[in-house]
Amino acid sequence: MKPTDSELEILHVLWANGPSTVRQVHEKLSQSRDIGYTTALKLMQIMYEKGLLSREEDSRSHTYTAIVSQEDTQRNLVDRFVETAFRGSASKLVMQVLGQHKASRAELDEIKNLLNDLNRDAGRSDESE
Amino acid sequence: MKPTDSELEILHVLWANGPSTVRQVHEKLSQSRDIGYTTALKLMQIMYEKGLLSREEDSRSHTYTAIVSQEDTQRNLVDRFVETAFRGSASKLVMQVLGQHKASRAELDEIKNLLNDLNRDAGRSDESE
DNA sequence: AAACATATACGAAGCTTTTCGTAGATGCAA
DNA sequence: TTGCATCTACGAAAAGCTTCGTATATGTTT
């Protein structure tokens, strides 16, 4: 189930802040763009119907929680994106991202470390061919 | 101008094969999914109106060409994607992609080389802060 | 020339996404 | 208890995407 861009905004708020009411989510969203309260409400209701969110009915308002995890969601999104935008070539995507976005040295080091591990694995499987 | 998923399919065909008629594009698309001829035609007409494609009117049919380059398009898509899916963190995206997709040793080496260059740059700008 | 194959143009239906207005319920305050 | 603030529910409009049917033009074949 692919969340839309608006739904993704809401998921990010819930992932960052944990279970929240519509009001809380709306306040966060308002910081970065113009959006009506009932718009946020409607979005979250739809996401509830879709099974993206769960909710607990408190006395007056509802508290919503993201059911889908950030990890799973991002993995799915990446899969689709690699497919549609890069015809399945993940390494092309990586090259593109690294080329056009700045990263701190710490981040680059982190990526390098991961890369070293992967390189060992690739080496192993290459030898077996 | 963000191409839709369907439009991206067509762009990929044109990028790979060069200027093509609707029939040629439709035949390529048919290999991977069910799509009517007039559907492909309509999509390409819309893309022409949007300025994504140019066309040359031959005697009987039209020959379409991608106006937007693959590089520019992918750069734009990556920008949007980093923003919406990873809240602007390009390195998170890279880590995610590297973790979940296999790459050959050659590809990994290529990425590593790029990374070394970037690391030098990051080092330089770090020192100036 | 008549019939046929194949091209484009066009309109429109069906769906999804985003947005908001309005109505009705409910807790709280005066 | 009456009214105010605030909540949910609901409907619906506007826009964009995808799809295809039908009409019409135009080469090609017989």
Image (spheres, coloured by chain):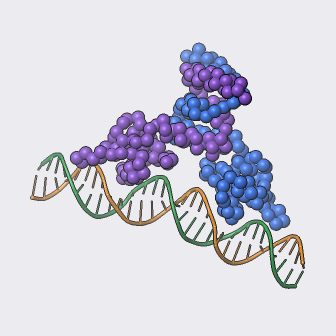
Chain colours: A blue, B purple, C orange, D green
Q: Which residue is located at x 64 percent, y 36 percent?
A: B90
| Depth order, front residue of B18/A121 | B18
Q: Position of residue D27 (x, y in %)?
A: 18, 48
Q: Which residue is located at x 54 percent, y 31 percent?
A: A92
Query: Is residue B108 in view?
Result: no
Q: Which residue is located at x 74 percent, y 47 percent?
A: A15
Does residue A31 sit above or below B14 in this rendering? below
Q: Position of residue A39 (x, y in %)?
A: 66, 62
Outermost residue, top side: A127
Quadrant of res B24:
top left
Q: Quadrant of the C terminus of chain B?
A: top right
Does residue B9 sit above or below B101 in this rendering? below
Quadrant of res B64:
top left
State the count of labels.
Answer: 0
Q: Position of residue C14 (x, y in %)?
A: 49, 62
Q: Which residue is located at x 59 percent, y 14 percent?
A: A127
Does residue A8 sit above or below A74 in this rendering? below
Q: Position of residue A89 (x, y in %)?
A: 53, 32
Query: In the shown orientation, is residue B82 left or right of residue C26?
Result: left
Query: In the shown orientation, is residue B74 left or right of residue C8?
Result: right
| Depth order, front residue of A75/A107 | A107
| Depth order, front residue of A95/A4 | A95
